[in-house]
Amino acid sequence: MLTLEGVVIEQGAFRLAADWSVRAGALVPVVGPSGAGKSTLLSVIAGFFPPSSGRVLWDGKDLSPLEPGARPLSIVFQDNNLFPHLTVAQNVGLGLSPGLKLDRAGWRRVEDSLGRVGLQGLGARKPAALSGGQQSRVALARVLLRARPLMLLDEPFAALGPALRAEMLGLVRDVAAETGATVLMVTHEPRDALRLGGETVLVADGMAAAPTETAALFDAPPETLRAYLGEG
Amino acid sequence: MAGRFGPVTGRARHPVIRIAGGAAALVVAALTLGTLVAVALRADGGPSLGPADWAAIRFTLIQAVLSAVFSVLLAVPVARALARRRFPGRVLLVTLLGAPFILPTIVAVLGLLAVFGRSGILSTALGWVGLGPIHIYGLHGVVLAHVFFNMPLAVRLILQGWLAIPAERFRLAASLGMGPREVFRRLEWPMLRAVVPGAFLVIFLVCTTSFAVALTLGGGPRGTTVELAIYQAFRFEFDLGRAALLSLIQFGICAVAAVAVWRVSLPSGLGGGLGRVVERWGIATPGLRALDAAAILLAALFLLTPLALIVIRGAPGLLSLPPSVLQATFRSLVVALCSVMLTLALALSLALMAQRARGLVAGGTEALASLSIAVSPLVIGTGLFLLVYPFADPVRLALPITALVNALMSLPFAYRAIAPALAEVETVRGPLASSLGMRGWARMRYMVLPALARPMGFAAGLAAALSMGDLGVIALFADPGQVTLPMQLYALMGSYRMEQAASTALLLLACSLALFWIFDRGGRMRADA
């Protein structure tokens, strides 16, 4: 279970508060206007910078002393998810060992996970030789291999077309089901949120609201969400 | 959104980086500030300035001002022509404008002598129409050589300024019906006013530390720079007190010029991105076309003829060079490679430390890395001599000292190439590496070093070429039996063995360019992202 315990994030005039929990295995779209702090919230959970007050807990354990790489989570950014000078297999292999010290069994697991995201046999290529959708698949293959209990997705498919995005969301659901992971996914696309289902966190007006059932939220949107959706 | 906050974790303060950075900072501080203290102590209470010293100061300033004025004035029409004309060979010419930076000074001097010297092709041509030969030695020779070296730099800086004017402004000007005169007044003149002072000061600074040019083209007491005077006090009179005093004066001149450059924000002419051509309207008139063509043609002739003559005259004797030249080549290559390793080690250590530090330490490290722009090699050489002299024979250490001082001279350029790339990779790829738990050597090997391959290759190429062609501090210490290739070339010129000199110059030129090309190319090939 992920718990944000009285978390307040402040930077200059920017302020964001969050105080809620997400049960293990939940799928959680994070929506809200741009600049509201969706990515910032994920960055704090991932440990890139500390909140000004409050704590982030996983299964009751405080994460604040842990560096980003030691936290029980994987994060996929909007871009720069792959090192361009390393091969696809090496990029995925970093998920097993940050120093790429893999034995034969390790490399076999890398190849396996590439196969599971539909990239069988492409391990020797460099990322530049892949399409945008394939690059997203490489990042997901690494998430699969790391098998951390929490997945943070920061608009990872924003650059893809609608059909490809739907496909990737399906893959995310598969990966999450396979690893039993809890998923927090930032998106500005209501349809993506609905497709992922689960419970949605609405970030607006300095507040990350507690997760609400996604379909219900979009059926009867509160004032802030209506303004964002353009239905106000 | 993460860009709004600086990352706090994941940027481990690694002890190796602290130790390496601290050691590098110590070496640089000892060589620049330490040698200066040694010089100051020695000069204290020493002899006062004689008329010859005042003449050297005057000459240094006058030649530097004239060199900077002519370089910039001549560069403006060339840069304008390059900015607005598309023609075959334009990219090659712009690339060649970067070449004088890695060109051994003494080779260029030999090439200029072949054109403008007493028996050069220009004097010969003037002889046909009944005019006397040109006298190149003296103030105008020194200025000519400095313009040869620095006009291309000025062209690149000003060209950058031209290309930095947004294309939309030229379109707007055209749609408003502005002619070339109004475009110049509204768009180009403000740009020149912003760019030219910086270019002028950089060139002035470079020319105040001129040694090799003054050594070869300066004419006797009336054509002596302070740097040359240090050398003469040292080498011929062995008057260490006077050499130290002159070193202090040289430092003062450099420091004042450097502070001025600092305030005008130093432009960088080493970058790329000069491939674009400004789209212009109303410049297709025959007069303007002829003007631009003439500017480009004359600049190309001025830069290429001396080098072409070196190649033509040097090639026949290349295979029959004496063993002493080949030994000197080997020595120079070893010195250059050592200097490359030192440069990279210093630049990388300082850049890594500056990146991890905050506030004063970061600023101090950066200042230290740029310090040697303002310190002359001969001042460092004099200081090192004073420091080493009581303990060991400096002449026996000539080659290691040369490698070290050369590395120090290349450091500002290497640092400027490496530090921004380091900052960028940390910003762009740092979060990913941190989220994967990559730290220490793994982060260095798989994230940092691959991203630095290109700037490090470029820096290594610069350091190698600068060291290969350097005729500076080695002249202070040189043991006649242990000379480098530029020293050997200088000796050959001094004894008027011009054919051997031309072949040696060609060999030196080839070595410098090849070293630069190999390192730069190597870096580019490793950065295949």
Image: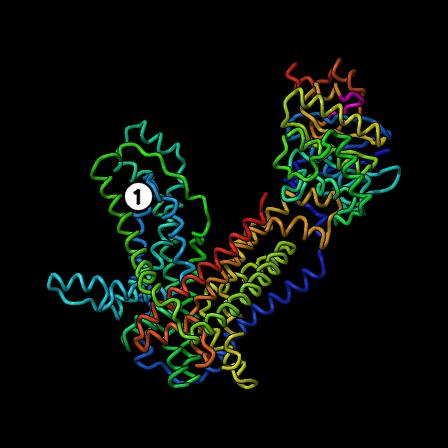
User: Dot 1 lies on which element?
Assistant: helix
Q: Which residue in the structure is indicated by mark 1?
A: B81
Quarter of the image with the C terminus of chain A in it: top right
Q: Give the camera-side residue of A107 and A7.
A: A107
Q: Residue B291: percent from the left, percent from the top? A: 23, 43
Q: Is residue B511 above or below residue B75?
A: below
Residue at (43, 59) in percent of width and height: B102
Question: Left or right of A89: which side holds B391?
Answer: left
Q: Quadrant of the N terminus of chain A?
A: top right
Left or right: B247 as drawn, with respect to A142? left
Across and down, in percent, residue B497 comes to 31, 75
In this rendering, the answer to whether A215 lies above or below B259 is: above
Q: Nearer the viewer, residue B388 or A37?
A: B388
Viewer-proximal residue among A60 and B302: B302
Within 10 Å of disc 1 (Cα), the crowding (few <14, some 14-19, many 20+) is: many
| Boundaries of the magenta span | A196-202
Asked if B12 appears above or below B409 in the picture, the reply is above
Of residue B243 and residue A229, the one placed in the foreground of this image is B243
Q: Is residue B319 visible?
A: yes
- Parent chain of label 1: B
Residue B68: in sight, yes or no? Answer: no
Magenta stretch contains residue A197: yes
Q: Viewed as shown, does residue B246 lie left or right of A57?
A: left
Q: Residue furthest right?
A: A60
Residue type marked 1: Ala
